[in-house]
Amino acid sequence: MITAFYKQKPTMDTPYRELVIQHKNGWRVRLSGGTKWGRENAKELKVVPARDFEDAKAVFDKIFAELQEEGWKAYSPYEPW
């Protein structure tokens, strides 16, 4: 699972966050972000280990809600600008 977030209309190199559930050497939820687009330019902000997918999904949902409370909007390529 992966979701990108923005606070202002996404244009080249605007602030963003990326929330990901990963299963590489165990389950974890990773939050990264920055202002320069591209995974290679992202700064890791938080990593939370999880026991299994259900645990990772609960962590993902919690961080997702926290980001929304901070004013971040989930990005959708289908959103009309």
Image (cartoon, rainbow, N blue to C red):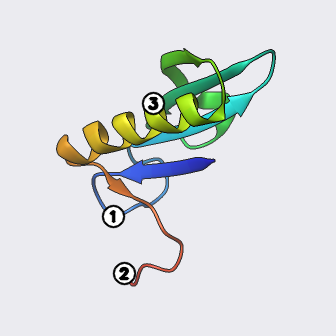
Q: Which one is closest to the eye, mark 2 or mark 3?
A: 3
> In the image, residue 19 lies at what x, y percent?
51, 39
Q: Is residue 79 left or right of residue 50?
A: left
Find the residue positioned furthest to the right: 25
Q: Amino acid at mark 3?
A: Val
Whether pointer 2 and pointer 1 mark residues with C-beta atoms closer than 8 Å, the reply is yes
Closer to the camera, 44 or 8? 44
Q: Which residue is mark 2?
A: 81
**Mark nearer the viewer, 3 or 1:** 3
In this figure, which residue is indicated by the disc labeled 1?
Answer: 9
Q: Secondary structure at mark 3?
A: helix
Q: Are marks 2 and 3 in contact (CB under 8 Å)?
A: no
User: Could you say which is closer to the camera, residue 7 or residue 70?
Assistant: 70
Please name the amino acid that badge 1 sits on: Lys
> Which residue does the image show at 58% across and 36% down from the upper left?
54
**Mark closer to the chain start, 2 or 3:** 3
Going 53% across and 17% down the picture, which residue do you hit? 47
